[in-house]
Image (tube, rainbow, N blue to C red):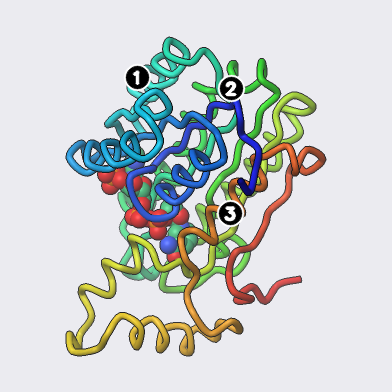
Amino acid sequence: MAYDYNGAVAVVTGGSSGVGLAAVRLLLESGARVAFCARNEGRLNDVTQVLARDFGEQNVMSMALSVLDEVHVDGFADAVRDRWNRCDLLVNNAGQGRISTFADTTNDDWRAEYELKLFSQILPTRAFLPMLRVSKGAIVAVNSLLAYQPEPHMVCTSSARAGVQNLLKSLSVEFAPEVRVNSVLLGLIGSGQWSRRFAEREDQSVSREEWYGELARKKGIPLGRLGDAQEAAHAIAFLGSKSASYITGAQLEVSGGLARHI
Ligand code: NDP
């Protein structure tokens, strides 16, 4: 067992795919009971069934909802309280990036992106904070390297992500000493978003390995490949664990060396 989550309850938003799902699995393997959410009910139920089979029904719960729906997010927190009456770790992971330059980003796009990036942190944090305070727990936000290293072709995602890092720093001070708040900054992780872009590639004869390898070369990733969802999950599980008990207000890059800032 890599991390000791025995007796703990973890909540993961966006837990039905990619980094979120890898985090759910790793936390279950580490002894936690885990509640997770996502919007697509069919995929959520499929994943829940597999996890209940592998880790026991008593250790897994899920709820279909959008993290942007305050009433549903509050209902999710109530359900976790009713079932397990505690929350030791909240992983704010749900979301996706938006590819657009300033020229092709409308005002509505800007509003939608800022709402997604900020409120996917704000609403679950507010809903689970009372339980996190009682358990002296932790929040781990899944954010992107774009917060510090903006890309012009992802202009609104980059700027909203910078705002999220700023918010998290404030929260780490306001919630101390009870609740620690940290983040992981992802570079390119070969999960849902990149699988979708791979599926839509121009030359369908190119294999996944070749496409990901070329992408890593183009992006100049020193480790020469995209990261795995499991590698991101390890950073999340570490920051949420007691092993990170003196770490708050910090960010951990999981980017294969892509980060250029010091
Ligand atoms: P995936 O697309 O594989 O998974 C995203 C998960 O979030 C799914 O479970 C999805 O389920 C859920 N989700 C999305 N929007 C919402 C919502 N509004 N409410 C509830 N659940 C939602 O993505 P990744 O694993 O690749 O990404 C995880 C996080 O890391 C995201 O926030 C992403 O932006 C960020 N990130 C990823 C990078 C990468 O290279 N992969 C790079 C930088 C950041 P459903 O669609 O059913 O709701």
Between the C-alphas of marks 3 and 2, the distance is 23 Å
* Three-letter amino acid code at the position of disc 1: Val
Give how far across and how far down residue 147 sits, in percent. 58, 60
Of labels 3 and 2, the one closer to you: 3
Q: Which residue is mark 1?
A: 71
Q: Secondary structure at mark 1?
A: helix
* Three-letter amino acid code at the position of disc 3: His
Give how far across and how far down residue 21 sits, in percent. 40, 48
Q: Is residue 6 above or below residue 107?
A: above
Q: Secondary structure at mark 3?
A: helix
Q: Is residue 48 above or below residue 203?
A: above
Would you call the spot at circle 2 few (<14 residues within 10 Å), some (14-19), or many (20 or more)? many
Residue 176: image quadrant is top right
Of labels 3 and 1, the one closer to you: 3
The foreground one among 111 and 126 is: 126
Between the C-alphas of marks 3 and 1, the distance is 31 Å
Q: Which residue is mark 3?
A: 234
Between the C-alphas of marks 2 and 1, the distance is 16 Å
What residue is shown at x 33% (from left), y 28% (from top)?
69
What residue is shown at x 38% (from left), y 70% (from top)?
101
The foreground one among 134 and 174 is: 134
Q: Are marks 2 and 1 in contact (CB under 8 Å)?
A: no
Q: Secondary structure at mark 2?
A: helix
Q: Which residue is mark 2?
A: 129
The tag on residue 79 is: none
